[in-house]
Image (cartoon, rainbow, N blue to C red):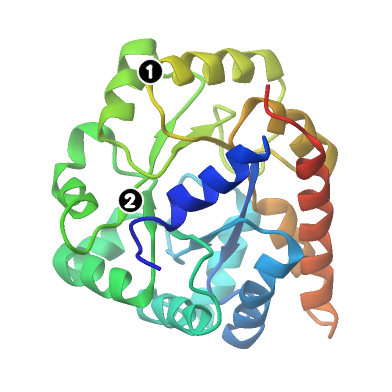
Amino acid sequence: MSNRCRIKSKFDFLKERNQSALVVFLTAGDPNIQISEKIIRGLPKAGADIIEIGMPFSDPMADGPVIQRSYNRALKNGNYISKTLELVRSFRKQDDTTPIILMGYYNPIYQIGLKKFFSDAYDAGVDGLLVVDLPPEEDKDILKYSKGKKKINIIKLTTPTTDKQRIINIAKSASGFIYYVSIAGITGSKINNFKNIEKTYKRLKKNTNLPFVIGFGINTPNKAKSLAKYADGIVVGSALIKEIEKSINYRNVINNVLGLVRKYSNAIKKARIT
């Protein structure tokens, strides 16, 4: 399947069923390359609709301690961008339909070179990119890679403090989906105001046809189910990485993580978008 349509096809499929997507975030190479690869391969069968893979970085300022520790474990194992792309290539040998998003920071991408990074990522089977520390005013250099022959969707972030006009501007240049950071804080923090999320969802839907995906702070299946009513997708990350940490010295780490993914998937699929 063409990289250009995996994300859209997935959201279109779920929209017909009035369901939200489960977007699963995991760090590439955590707790090691072998286990990471097996977990990622098992995600679609466990109920993940879209896979978001974190590219380990030594200074992840937007991430909380749980994800920071996962980056440190991966970096100690020598997992850099090249190995992250190897994980994607390996996954694509068995699955050519599940969308894959890379999440990371601009510095490592810039060091590789934008042209090489985007070409290698596209060839590996990547569908989208989220650069968390690159504001819309400074992302012109990467936006051109959301067009043309080797197209990769550029996912954009909005937050509870993003005003209406800025949301409109972000929606114009984004592709794939809009990622709504549900809290004014780091990953793993708690969500306190569901009403604001509902208002933002309705406001965004008036200004863009792009799917609206909520991330940060979704740490229980029940919370995922509640939020799924106001979103086209729900991102779960820190809760799964905590499960990796709890199971890190045990043989059942893969089953534990995939079992938790199933719980989130079952909860989300019971909700209906309003």
Q: Considering only vertical position in the picture, is 64 above or below 38?
A: above
| Spot occupied by residue 133 in the image (x, y as percentages of width and height) | 35, 44
Q: Find residue 42 and report its horizontal and vertical position in percent.
A: 69, 74
Q: Position of residue 218 (x, y in %)?
A: 71, 40
Q: Which mark is residue 182?
A: none
Three-letter code for the amino acid on which mark 2 is drawn:
Asn
Residue drawn at point x = 56 percent, y = 39 percent: 186
Secondary structure at badge 2 equals: strand
204 lies above or below 51:
above
Asked whether residue 79 is in view, the answer is yes
Marks 1 and 2, Cα distance to the nearest angstrom? 19 Å
Q: Quadrant of residue 170?
A: top left
Camera-side residue: 12 or 108?
12
Which comes sooner in the sequence, label 1 or label 2? 2
Quarter of the image for residue 25 reads: bottom right
Determine which residue is flagged by label 1: 207
